[in-house]
Image: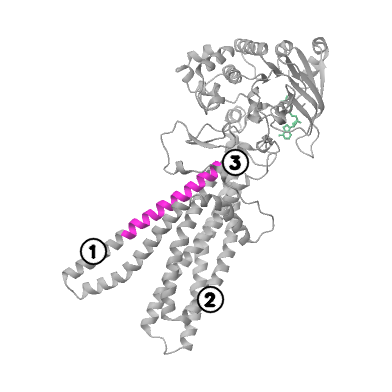
Amino acid sequence: MSLHGLLFLSPPFPPPLFYLRSAQKDKPKFLHINSRWRPPFISSLKPTNSIKLPLNAQTSQTPLSKALETLAKLKPFLQTNHQPILLGWLCSSISVFSLSQIIPRIGSFSSNLINIVSISKLRDQCLLLGVFVLVKLVACYWQQAFLWEASLRTVCQMRVFVFETVLEKELGFFEGNDGVSSGDIAYRITAEASDVADTLFALLNTIVPNMLQLFAMGTQMLVISPSLSLISAIMIPFMALVIAYLGEKLRKISKRAHLSIATLAAYLNEVLPAIFFVKANTGELSEHARFQRLAYTDFSRHLAKKKMKALIPQIIQIIYFGVLCVLCVGFLVVSRGSFDGCSMVSFVTSLVFLVEPIQGVGKAYNEFKQGEPAIERLFDLTRMKSKVIEKPDAIYLGHVKGEVKFCDVSFKYADNMPLVLDGLNLTVRAGETIALVGPSGGGKTTLVKLLLRLYEPSSGSILIDNHNIKSIRLESLRRHVGLVSQDTMLFSRTVAENIGYRDLMSNIDMEKVELAAQIANADEFIRTLPEGYRSQIGPRGSLLSGGQKQRLAIARAVYQVSSILVLDEATSALDSKSELLVRQAVERLMENYTVLVIAHRLETILMADRIFLLQNGKLQELSRSTFLAGHHDSLLSAGAAI
Ligand SMILES: Nc1ncnc2c1ncn2[C@@H]1O[C@H](COP(=O)(O)OP(=O)(O)OP(=O)(O)O)[C@@H](O)[C@H]1O
């Protein structure tokens, strides 16, 4: 496996809102970069790591405990946004109050209109009615505006929190050891988080206004007929049971729909970046068939979800009105004569207005059940603690000479997997260059991952200048170990931003950028680009040639002023001129750094001070003559890294 995996899900370049874990680890803060747009709430976003989530739930839960657990996850985020929520609810009570004033006024206004009372009285009534209508409309607008702000802000904070947690995960999480593909992660944080915003809005926009209406209409019914109100009230727990049952069904169907769309997104994420390969191998037909299958699965699952959503309100209405009619008719027959027609009309009118909020609550509950899988899947990403943990007393290394020691290092990717490295020992002196060769799958890349502390060794230790890397701050360690990976990971940014990637959050030093480019033999071609160092290089550096990409990657490693460089030499063949330029750049690096090179070219191997063969988890030093005499050919036939 190549180093491609190391950067497979590299963080995207700063979005408008960017969360920085600064050098002072305990003081995270939000920064805004290159963005004119600034959401009004952003200044009040709380640092996300101040949010404490409840512990994850256990298996075998009832729907209610599951719902409560989901709400508990949202609670800390909602609490930080209590202000717009309360303002929204205040507006909703003003709106309900206005409605309660409008309805009787419309009645008396229309009767006055028919009976032609004085014009001035009609005008006053009309004005008052107009004021209440206006207040209701304005309150209704602000209710929705505040509640949308609360929902979207909550989701924005959740996204930042989840992304921060995802970034802190060890590499294994992204390499699929936990079964989550990068496309799936992206889908959860983008589209599914938007679903959560809709769910939150539905909940917040329903609870208080509907409760108020329920209360107002319930009081009116109680005044008209307490016994008939009691009969109607009996229906509520029964209806709650029906709604809960159907809601649980909807949750399961929604979860399947979420999974199918996430699979579709993950598939596209995998196949579109590989379109070059697909076309070169005329794979369009098979990819089309695969996409069609996935799209059809998604279609059928979403259709099932929509049908269920449409069915639920109908079932609720049929049951509610059916049972209520039977009960009311029975009551009227029993209490014949004691209930006049006018009271009956008022009672039924109130009942109709009472059913509306009950249905609203049912709808909101179903929205919640529909959004619950999205919330679960989003927070699932925050589970599983990284095994690579920075010690609280980890030290910051200002300068290192560059001596690297592997002491008895063993490693396997999972308990049920074979050892990739088996009691490996290696000492690289400061300033020395060693070439690592060996058969494909021999563990060369794994060795590098351990040095960068992207994984933890199963046993043994790795030292840099006699400091165990476990006792060094991760940021400091990775600043001292520069990496030029086989698959040069470049981003859709300018040349300067790609070279000065380390300093994107502060100021990129242009002098250093140019110097690094000169060392990497890249300066010349960069100056021929339309805007020089400010030229955009396209997605993944698509506007550059293979050799130019490699030199840019080398320049990036040089820029970071590492003492130790890991070079995973690209296997892709370059034309002889490009190859010479890259080799010259590598030679320059070898003069100033401790270099571990996973070498694929004979010239590079021969440039190294020492050559090591990594095979069956063990390391064996080869003299130049031994290598040339025997191993060169045998390694080539075994598909080795030369
Ligand atoms: N994330 C992973 N999870 C499980 N196994 C892995 C993972 N990454 C690599 N392996 C396995 O570990 C072994 C060593 O892989 P590694 O990538 O270190 O080899 P390599 O020597 O760099 O190979 P190549 O020269 O082909 O790039 C291989 O058998 C590989 O299948």
Q: Which residue sits at x=58%, y=68%? A: 241
Callout 1 touching callout 2 (CB < 8 Å) = no
Q: CA distance from mark 3 to mark 1?
A: 56 Å
Q: Which residue occupies the foreground of this view, 276 or 443?
A: 443
Q: CA distance from mark 1 to mark 2?
A: 42 Å
Residue 158 part of the magenta segment: yes
Residue assigned mark 2: 234
Q: Which residues are magenta?
A: 135-160
Task: Point out residue 542 in the picture as x, y percentages from the top left corner.
Answer: 54, 24
| Element marked by disc 3 | helix
In terms of secondary structure, what is the magenta stretch mainly? helix
Residue furthest out toward the bottom: 337
| Element marked by disc 1 | helix
Query: In the picture, residue 5 is in which quadrant?
Result: top right
The colouring scheme, among rainbow, by chain, secondary structure or one colour, is one colour
Task: Point out residue 512 in the picture as x, y percentages from the top left corner.
Answer: 54, 16
Q: Which residue occupies the foreground of this view, 275 or 473?
A: 473
Tag nearer the camera, 2 or 3: 2
Callout 2 touching callout 3 (CB < 8 Å) = no
**What amino acid is found at the position of numbered circle 1 in the picture?**
Leu
